[in-house]
Image (spheres, helix red, strand yellow):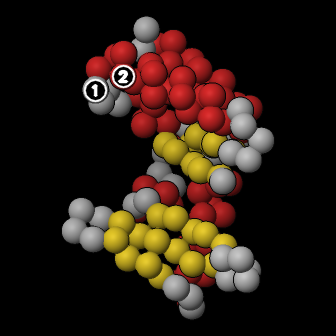
Amino acid sequence: MVAVIDEYVLRRPVGGGHVMREQLRHLAEMSGRHHIHLHVVPAAVGSYPGLNGAFVVATTPDGDDVAYLDNQLQGHVVPHGPDVLSLVRTWESVRAEALSARQSAELIEEAAQAWT
């Protein structure tokens, strides 16, 4: 699994300091697993395609990509076609803006300490 989050997720106080610290420590722990790659887009990047909303791209066992979009009213599966290709390209752009896994882990640890 590869996930990209915005640095503001690490800084926005949701649930108080204790909750934030524990959530970030959990992210740091999970990112240390061999099958999980967590990346952070630093705030200094400014505007980038990921700000248009969250989405998931998954590859099925037969090699096809599918996407999932979610909003406040409903979720939507995008099974194939040009919309999935567009989201794959957006994913690549978002990933290109993100820090490496090591840099991301260091930033997450720093943010967790800041919530102490």
Q: Residue furthest top?
A: 116
Element type where label 1 sits in the image = loop
Residue 40: x and y, percent?
58, 40
Q: Residue furthest front?
A: 61
Residue 3: x and y, percent?
59, 50
Mark 1 and mark 2: Cα distance apart in space: 5 Å
Q: Is residue 88 above or below residue 31?
A: below
Going by the numbered disc 2, the residue's amino acid type is Val
Q: In which quadrant of the rendered view does residue 37 lie?
A: top right
Q: Are marks 1 and 2 in contact (CB under 8 Å)?
A: yes
Q: Is residue 89 above or below residue 94?
A: below
Q: Which residue is mark 1?
A: 15
Return the mark for residue 110. Answer: none
Q: Which residue is mark 2?
A: 19
Going by the numbered disc 1, the residue's amino acid type is Gly
Residue 106: x and y, percent?
66, 24
Q: In which quadrant of the rendered view does residue 110 lie?
A: top right
Q: Is residue 9 above or below residue 3?
A: above
Q: Is residue 64 visible?
A: yes
- Horizontal side of 76 relative to 49 (left or right) equals left
Q: Is residue 111 visible?
A: no
Q: How many marks?
A: 2
Quarter of the image for the C terminus: give it: top left
